[in-house]
Image (cartoon, grey):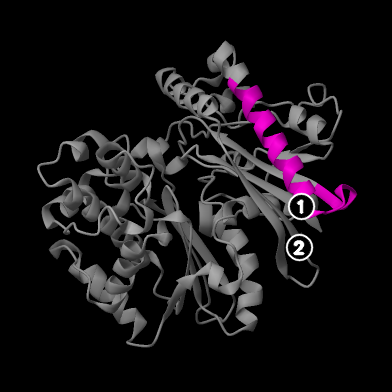
Amino acid sequence: MITIGVMTGNSLDGVDAVVTDFSDNGNIRDIDAISIPYPPKLRQNMLELRHIVTDLHSDMTKVNKLPLFKTTLAAYTDLVALTVEQLIEKSGVDKSKISAVGLHGQSCGEHNPPSLAQGAEPFTTQIFDAPSLAKKIGLPVIYDFRSDDIFNGGEAAPLAPMHNLHLSYTLAKQGMFPICFINGGNTANIAVITSGDTLHKKILGFDCGPFNHYADFLAHAFFDKDFDENGKLALEGHINSMLLNDLYNEAALTANGDVYFDILPPKSSGPHLYRMEERLKNYPLAEVDILRTVEYFAAYTVFLSLRFIPEHLDFPRYFLMFGGGWKNPLIYRDFISLLTGRGFVLPQHTQFAERIRHRLRGEKFYASLTDDYSISGQYMEARIMADMARCFLLKKKFTAPEITGCRKASVCGIICLPNENTRRKGRGFVYSRAAKGWSKLKK
């Protein structure tokens, strides 16, 4: 089955799209991919819309009535349609052979899963216009993937683990098992595919916390750069233990003030939890030292997240990284240093670090980018959407209790066909079905 996946992330830098062939024998092969940057005006409007959504406490019924929402969503849909059409032309794939397009949509407000809702209504916020997109490109569009998991009591994140499991089938044939996939995007998440005493394959996954978020912010605030390319900006900086400690205690906090990194999985995070920008910008250290410490912190929190892998499961021996953050050699080396016992650890985390290293038992481990195994890291998140579209069509479940904490595994998404009367059929949504207030609407 051939599907297209489309992803636009929190960084608002552009549209990533990939056309992927999922063969019946489990092989997954990207045929082609493309990225088109956000026009400056659309990016500015999306940023402004985010602020409005926040000010309106994620009440999308009010946001939906704003002229800015309608014009921004229309421009976004046009850009996605252009990206898909250019990808099809570039790839040379016969359009009739493409089963569907998987569209994540643009996250535009709070992601408030059960772990953060503290007993109140959980919700998630993405925007999309699938009916218009389906009409423009002449293909079925499958979208709103996160809502079904929220309905089933899950975190609706991360979405990567199930796709990582599908990728692991081919890798396992090459002897790569147990394996840990690590996404280093704005937020980091891990997916562990392993087994235990029963030898049955197990999967677990969760968000680790901010990864590129603060580094990108500081690169722009201090050096007027979008990001720290190849770690060049932080290269002359030094890791500061006091700032590292403050980052751990303040960089990601729940509404109740709980430190995100100490919360047991399943859990999910996002920019709405990351509230330390202004303090970092004015922290009493040299700018390069602040940036260097923030980049070390990215590797540090991923490393400490490994402590949540249950003892009855085999510890990973293969670590495969993807996402833009891992292209920074400083962060990559920091993670390896922590695994091998050479990286600095705060005193309160010494026991955690020793336990992680003990579970490695001194055996050789392997860490590399997914690209080294012909798996594009740049288009991983877009390919997840392609995989979710495929699984929707095949009625395969894409979430699991051990990943998102849902009560039961879910087939995720809804579909819009070209020229379908989606409003009559109740599928013409322009924001998440599980947006704030969904529980009242479902009664």
Q: How much space separates mark 2 and mark 1, taking CA atoms?
A: 8 Å
> In which quadrant is the N terminus drawn?
bottom right
Q: Read off the magenta span.
A: 72-99
The image shows residue 19 at horizontal and vertical percentages of: 73, 54
Is residue 153 visible to the viewer in this orientation of the structure? yes
The image shows residue 315 at horizontal and vertical percentages of: 42, 77
SS for dot 2: strand
The image shows residue 187 at horizontal and vertical percentages of: 42, 49
Measured along the vertical axis of the image, is residue 228 above or below residue 180?
A: above
Q: Residue at x 86, y 28 (%)?
A: 420
Which of the 4 quarters of the picture holds residue 69?
top right
Please state which amino acid type lies under the numbered disc 1. Thr
> In which quadrant is the C terminus drawn?
top right
Estimate how packed mark 2 is, as few (under 14), some (14 to 19) or many (20 or more) residues with alpha carbons within 10 Å: some
Q: Residue at x 64, y 55 (%)?
A: 383
Lateral position of residue 78 relative to residue 337, left or right = right
* Residue closest to the eye, 252 or 12: 12
Is residue 443 visible to the viewer in this orientation of the structure? no
Lateral position of residue 389 relative to residue 350, left or right = right
Estimate how packed mark 1 is, as few (under 14), some (14 to 19) or many (20 or more) residues with alpha carbons within 10 Å: many
Mark 2 or mark 1: name the one nearer the start of the chain. Answer: 1
- Say which residue label 1 marks: 3
Assign the magenta stretch its main secondary structure: helix
Are the residues at dot 2 and dot 1 in contact (C-beta closer than 8 Å)? yes
Lateral position of residue 3 relative to residue 421, left or right = left
Measured along the vertical axis of the image, is residue 250 above or below residue 328?
A: above
Q: Residue at x 53, y 68 (%)?
A: 370
- Say which residue label 2 marks: 22
